[in-house]
């Protein structure tokens, strides 16, 4: 450690003895979040504090008394494990560069700047709303593992997304959840004077400033922007307050700050890069700032646009028209009238960059703008690539749908983050201790068949019991803290039974995801739930957007159905779904249910996380399942075309699969032994997901398809 790092750790953790300063060093880097041995070191300090901190090393260290840490510093058993993990951490951080980029990227600069509105990294850093954020988090973690030279930019969101509480009538309430910045793996970026760096954002008047924070994600630096500082006026202070403001003008200002302000921050930090990767259109204004930089260097707008296009990757995740940001022309004029001049454009020519040909009067479409400017565009699954090409074909009227320049890279999940530690130990035993280092090799996953059925099933049952225990503990805490209505205790999952076939559904609650589809025929469902010999139970979790009343009504219907004694306590809704409970869910249920309205599922990475841990999917053939389903690794429906509303058809398919295939297979055992047929499906799910749908495969595809080419097109400084 450098002297500066040591001094910072001493200041941050004054209770740490010198012998344990490495704990503070590790706590400030999210590397610990995907390395179980590191988490175990913190847990072994004090298991109760670790539990109460919600597995947050930063908070754990600050709450353990000085005298306790002094005793630990004398414990030879603890020190052996601590020294080993600290050495592994230091070895991991040794500088290197992805060999695939070594010929085209300077070793002293990040090759790629990655912009995203949200990052799902750990529940102590609530900078995410759903799948888009978890994808971004998994992406930069894998870039760290592969030593891809990348820097990431996002927002602080001091008020997070939304803390969900269910009222007695089943309605979702949205509560504030301020981020405790002093008890998380996040640090202020300091200027030369030792004060926190503050940068003025171009464009916005009156002047708007952002303070800069940094999260170390292994080898990757994630810079976060925060407008909640005293120098800003009240309305400007709230720009970065929470994800996805419902106020359209504030939303525009938010995206200006992220895109243009983010570029300005990188410049002030002295961070130069060659390729820009936009994860959705929220940060697309960064393209304008790149173009403006090239114009200031002497290029014309046409030349600058070409240079930026050739070195920009844009990933679209949204096949739902309402999911694309569109800003009224008058608002664009208010904020960009003078900015247009610096681009050498008149106002009308500027607005044309963001007009959708099908809806020219609707406003400035951020996705249309990003697609027009970016040289490399992709959807997030094979099926989504097809949908996106049809959806945006009119941006290229001379091209047929098959020639629209939107490729695809199917999303993947970061295996070290989402594999459950007990499952990882099982894999170590039968796949070999080095399997994780080369988990993108499909031949490794064939060794899953070497695992005895009984051992895999026992591990799964342990995780299932852990899930149900966690649900009951949540309900217990609500009972103590809020004197919860007993019927809400039931709907919260207190009557769940670990011996019963358990279906999991955890998504963002919006109408097209059809969370309540399985409730379509309640009488038929009740027979399955309350069957004396072969019952099922269903665990729901997820949040509706604060402004999405239709989504809240779906959620309310599920909660009120769950509290009805008619259904025997076999339905549960677990409130405040986040990263920590997502881990419990994807590890512990028996079947993962996914039934959005096709073709509106872009990918659906939660099913991948479940499959990786031996939980097969029951899913509509859309998104990743269109590629992943092979007839042996789960169950599929919904491939047929249906005129009009297809809810009845798809619900019928779910009931039929449950009645005829899933339930009989799960309970097919002799003399109280396990169902070997069921375990065979579990093994096939793991084998399918392990390499084909990993973040490693995903990042390598971005390298091969886009980054290498884009780096060749970079304009020299």
Image (tube, helix red, strand yellow):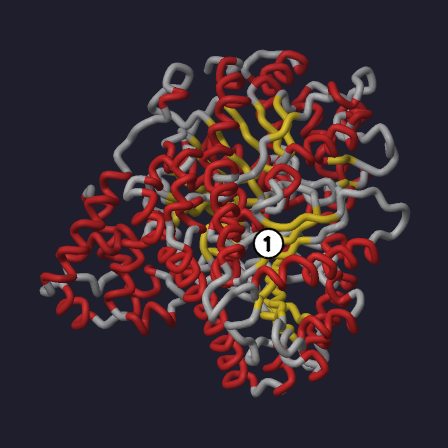
In this picture, residue 475 sits left or right of residue 369: left
Name the residue located 78 percent from the left edge and 30 percent from the top edge. 390
Name the residue located 71 percent from the left edge and 38 percent from the top edge. 335
| In the foreground, 623 or 318 | 623
User: Can you say which quadrant of the picture contains the N terminus?
Assistant: top left
| In the foreground, 139 or 302 | 139
In this picture, residue 539 sits left or right of residue 350: left
Q: Report which quarter residue 319 is drawn in.
A: top right
Name the residue located 54 percent from the left edge and 22 percent from the top edge. 705
Give the SS element for disc 1.
loop
| Residue behind mark 1 | 129
In this picture, residue 124 sits left or right of residue 89: right
Residue 400 spot, x, y in % from top left:
80, 19
Q: Residues within 10 Å of mark 1 (few under 14, many from 20)?
A: many
Residue 598 spot, x, y in % from top left:
76, 45
In this picture, residue 198 sits left or right of residue 372: left
Residue 211 spot, x, y in % from top left:
47, 47
Q: Is residue 170 above or below residue 613?
A: below
Which residue in the rendered view is the most extreme toward the right?
Answer: 644
Q: Is residue 69 above or below residue 378?
A: below
Q: Report if residue 119 is visible in the image.
A: no
Q: Report if residue 53 is visible in the image.
A: yes
Residue 510 spot, x, y in % from top left:
72, 57
């Amino acid at each position: 450690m450098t002297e500066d790092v040591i001094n910072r750790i001493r200041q941050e953790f004054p209770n740490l003895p010198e012998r344990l300063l490495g704990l503070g060093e590790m706590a400030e880097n999210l590397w610990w979040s995907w390395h179980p041995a590191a988490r175990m070191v913190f847990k072994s300090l004090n298991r109760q504090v670790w539990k109460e901190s919600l597995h947050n090393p930063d908070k754990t260290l600050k709450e353990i008394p000085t005298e306790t840490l002094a005793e630990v510093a004398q414990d030879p058993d603890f020190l052996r494990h601590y020294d080993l993990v600290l050495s592994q951490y230091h070895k991991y951080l040794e500088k290197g560069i992805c060999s695939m980029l070594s010929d085209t990227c300077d070793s002293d600069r990040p090759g790629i700047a990655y912009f995203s509105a949200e990052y799902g990294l750990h529940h102590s850093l609530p900078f995410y709303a759903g799948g888009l954020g978890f994808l971004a988090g998994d992406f930069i973690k894998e870039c760290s593992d592969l030593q891809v030279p990348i820097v990431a930019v996002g927002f602080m969101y001091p008020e997070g997304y939304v803390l969900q509480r269910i009222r007695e009538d089943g309605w979702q309430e949205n509560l504030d959840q301020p981020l405790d910045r002093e008890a998380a793996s996040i640090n202020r970026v300091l200027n030369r004077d030792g004060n926190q760096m503050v940068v003025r954002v171009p464009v916005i008047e009156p002047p708007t400033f952002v303070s800069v924070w940094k999260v170390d994600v292994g080898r990757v630096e994630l810079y976060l922007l925060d407008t909640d500082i005293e120098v800003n006026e009240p309305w400007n202070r709230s720009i970065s307050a929470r994800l996805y403001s419902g106020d359209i003008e504030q939303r525009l200002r938010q995206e200006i700050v992220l895109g243009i302000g983010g570029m300005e921050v990188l410049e002030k930090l002295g961070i130069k890069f060659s390729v820009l990767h936009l994860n959705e259109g929220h940060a697309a204004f960064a393209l304008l700032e790149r173009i403006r930089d090239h114009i200031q260097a002497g290029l014309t707008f046409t030349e600058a646009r070409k240079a930026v296009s050739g070195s920009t990757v844009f990933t679209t995740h949204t096949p739902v028209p309402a999911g694309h940001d569109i800003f009224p022309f008058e608002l664009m004029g208010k904020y960009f009238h003078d900015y247009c001049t610096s681009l050498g454009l008149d106002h009308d020519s500027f607005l044309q960059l963001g007009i959708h040909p099908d809806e020219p009067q609707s406003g400035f479409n951020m996705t249309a703008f990003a697609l027009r400017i970016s040289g490399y565009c992709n959807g997030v699954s094979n099926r989504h690539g097809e949908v996106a090409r049809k959806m945006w074909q009119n941006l290229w009227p001379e091209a047929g749908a098959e020639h629209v320049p939107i490729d695809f890279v199917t999303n993947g999940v970061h295996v070290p983050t989402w594999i459950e530690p007990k499952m990882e130990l099982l894999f170590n035993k039968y796949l070999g201790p080095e399997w994780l280092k080369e988990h993108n090799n499909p031949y490794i996953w064939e060794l899953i068949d070497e695992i005895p059925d009984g051992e895999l099933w026992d591990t799964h049952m342990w995780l299932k019991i852990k899930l149900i225990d966690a649900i009951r503990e949540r309900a217990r805490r609500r009972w103590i803290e809020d004197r919860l209505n007993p019927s809400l205790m039931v709907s919260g999952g207190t009557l769940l039974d670990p011996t019963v076939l358990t279906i999991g559904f955890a998504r963002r609650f919006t109408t097209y995801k059809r969370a309540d589809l399985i409730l379509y025929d309640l009488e038929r469902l009740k027979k399955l739930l309350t069957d004396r010999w072969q019952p099922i139970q269903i665990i729901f979790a997820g949040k509706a957007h604060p402004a999405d009343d239709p989504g809240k009504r779906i959620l309310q219907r599920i909660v009120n159905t769950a509290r009805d004694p008619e259904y025997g306590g076999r339905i549960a809704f677990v409130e405040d779904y986040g990263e920590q409970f997502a881990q419990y869910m994807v590890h512990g249920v028996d079947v993962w249910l996914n039934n959005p309205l096709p073709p509106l599922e872009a990918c659906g990475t939660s099913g991948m996380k479940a499959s990786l841990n031996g939980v097969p999917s029951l899913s509509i053939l859309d998104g990743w399942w269109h590629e992943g389903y092979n007839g042996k690794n789960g169950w599929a429906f919904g491939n047929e075309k249906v005129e009009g509303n297809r809810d009845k058809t798809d619900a019928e398919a779910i009931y039929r699969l449950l009645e005829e295939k899933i339930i009989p297979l799960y309970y097919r055992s002799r003399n109280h032994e396990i169902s070997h047929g069921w375990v065979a499906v579990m093994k096939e799910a793991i084998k399918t997901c392990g390499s084909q749908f990993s973040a490693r495969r995903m990042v390598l595809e971005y390298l091969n398809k886009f980054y290498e080419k884009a780096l060749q097109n970079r304009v020299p400084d």
